[in-house]
């Protein structure tokens, strides 16, 4: 499936322009600094944008302790007020009002409200198909923002309209992701799922019942994205 027009009510997600060019560069710099600090601490590496995009090609040879470096506590942050103001802005608030949400709070499971993911194509860095309602972050809306690596093949994977249906699920017994989060029992076909095309400064908002996967199986670059969640009040 390949589409460019999305509706939150119909598809369970939609894409909208959240950040100006200048604001995106500030948020991008924040994310790269956060990740760069981890690479210096855990691997003794200085990280450029070019190196990060090809991290899937050299990280193993450089003996970067990927799993240890990117534990949940290292990927989350409270961020500062300047970053919070850029991300939770009037554009987002207006978009939320259009889908019927006028009051909300940032959802924080105790590690910080803002998180990043660094996903290489191939080794299973991102979790397989699930939805927020199947884990601890129930009933929250997710705001997903690509920062680096805009190739369509490495974008988040979604099943349009899945928020309107029920699906079979199971609880995995061997996983390095959240232990109490259910997974979809089958792999959606290309006809029922898609990876959206997104541009710098755009964000994706999705429903807590929308099936999605962060996993990337094929691609020519490593992806860096930010995500935060909102709990309607």
Image (cartoon, rainbow, N blue to C red):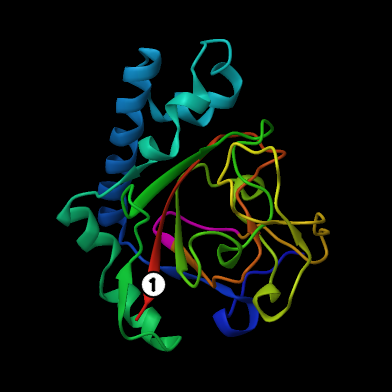
Q: Is residue 141 magenta?
A: no
Q: Residue at the location (76% across, 69% down)?
A: 167
Query: Seen in the image, is 34 located left or right of residue 228?
Result: left
**Quarter of the rendering containing residue 231:** bottom left
In depth, the one of 99 and 231 nearer the eye is 231
Read off the magenta span. 197-202
Q: Residue at the location (26% across, 75% down)?
A: 90
Give the overall secondary structure of the magenta segment: loop
The x, y position of residue 4, in whole percent, is 63, 69
Q: Secondary structure beneath disc 1?
A: strand
Residue 34 vertical placement versus 116 (above, below):
above
**Quarter of the rendering containing residue 188:** bottom right
**Quarter of the rendering containing residue 158:** bottom right
- Which quadrant, please, contains the C terminus? bottom left
Q: How many marks?
A: 1
Residue 141 vertical placement versus 75 (above, below):
below
Q: Residue at the location (57% across, 67% down)?
A: 133
Query: Seen in the image, is 232 located left or right of residue 209?
Result: left
The x, y position of residue 97, in whole percent, is 37, 86
Query: Seen in the image, is 86 located left or right of residue 232?
Result: left
- Which quadrant, please, contains the N terminus? bottom right
User: What residue is disc 1 on?
Assistant: 231
The x, y position of residue 40, in whole percent, is 32, 18
């Amino acid at each position: 499936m390949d589409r460019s027009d999305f509706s939150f009510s119909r598809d369970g997600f939609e894409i909208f322009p959240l950040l100006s060019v200048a604001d995106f560069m500030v948020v991008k710099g924040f994310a790269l600094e956060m990740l760069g600090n981890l690479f210096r601490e855990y691997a003794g590496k200085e990280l450029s944008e070019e190196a990060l995009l090809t991290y899937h090609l050299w990280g193993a040879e450089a003996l970067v302790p990927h799993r240890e470096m990117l534990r949940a506590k290292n990927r989350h942050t409270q961020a500062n007020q300047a970053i919070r103001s850029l991300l939770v802005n009037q554009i987002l608030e207006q978009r939320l009002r259009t889908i019927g949400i006028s009051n909300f709070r940032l959802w924080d499971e105790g590690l910080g409200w803002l998180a990043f993911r660094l996903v290489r194509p191939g080794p299973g860095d991102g979790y397989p198909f699930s939805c927020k309602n199947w884990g601890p972050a129930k009933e929250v809306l997710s705001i997903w923002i690509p920062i680096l690596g805009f190739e369509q093949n490495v974008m988040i994977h979604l099943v349009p309209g899945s928020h309107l249906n029920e699906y079979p699920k199971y609880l995995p017994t061997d996983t390095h992701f959240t232990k109490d989060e259910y997974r979809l029992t089958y792999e959606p076909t290309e006809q029922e799922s898609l990876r959206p095309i997104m541009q710098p400064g755009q964000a994706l908002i999705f429903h807590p019942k929308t099936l999605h996967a962060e996993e990337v199986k094929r691609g020519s670059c490593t992806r860096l994205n930010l995500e935060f969640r909102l709990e309607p009040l």
